Image (cartoon, grey):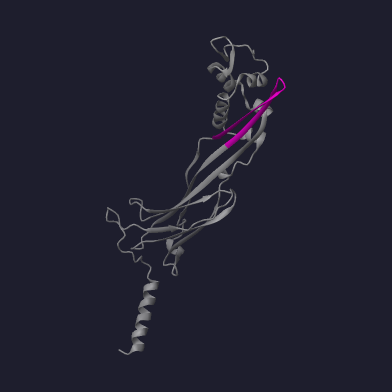
Amino acid sequence: MKTIYKILAVIVLAGLWACEKNDPLADQGDLTGHVVPFILLAQMPDAPAGDTITLRALSWAVDDDISQISLYHRGFKLQTYEVKIRAEGDDVTHELSVTMQADSIIIPETLIDQYPKEGESLNDYYQTYENAYVILHDFMVPMGYALNKERDGELILAMPESAYQMLVAHFSTMFYRALMVAVFPDINPFSVVYFEVDDGGFFTGALTDEGMAYVREHLGRELMIEILHEARVADNTRVTVRANAIIDPAHEGKSSERTFRVL
């Protein structure tokens, strides 16, 4: 065969291979012997809640038998609070500061969408250039992931009850007699129920367990705002998007995940 014909033959074979729809990764498979699909989810940018980002999922299978591609999202919030209080008593300014990390908030996995849609075929999403099914989906970042940007009194009012109770519990262990009297002027400053005394009968300045319990019970949000000097929160929120491709419901699929930060 002449050299020119050999070159043409190679080009034709290469072209046929490039247009072939089946996945060349013939060694894919699971313990059931059923070939699993391949899926890749492209990295997405950091974005604020309410913004729309484009999810791009690319998948294929050896026997070209993917039946469904699904997209999901889940996330978590880690919030660190810094709260400072200030109270005046007996010409003395009393100040306390608490920095705490509240319990993480978990947003469970939720379905975004599934493909193909009714009346469609996955073949509608096949791209010869990619030699794969390519799903493009516009995803609006749910407002449930929005960062907590309140400060000072607004932040105190917006805190989840569990976080606020944790904050008050932290403060209760730091209160002392002079501050207690300044914040709660109606309390008996000579109470041995709320204030510790030493062996000589003198007040140590520390609170008893009953005194700390009094703080936890009576330091409500309104009073906290009255003595508040500053309150802020650092909100670290992450969203994970998962793309899953399956051959049929009876067989496990293949997933790909990407995580982005909420701005």
Q: Residue at x 64, y 35 (%)?
A: 231
Give residue 18's quadrant in the image. bottom left
Please determine whether, in this image, residue 93 is positioned above or below residue 230.
Answer: above
Left or right for 45, reference 150: left
Q: Which residues are magenta?
A: 81-100
Which residue is at the far bottom?
2
Q: Nearer the viewer, residue 123 or 158?
A: 158
Q: Residue at x 35, y 78 (%)?
A: 13
Left or right for 26, reference 144: left
Give residue 82's quadrant in the image. top right
Q: Residue at x 51, y 35 (%)?
A: 103
| SS majority, magenta | strand
Q: Quadrant of the N terminus?
A: bottom left
Q: Can residue 60 be found in the magenta stretch?
A: no
Q: Nearer the viewer, residue 95 or 152?
A: 95
Q: Position of residue 257 (x, y in %)?
A: 44, 52
Q: Position of residue 161 (x, y in %)?
A: 56, 30
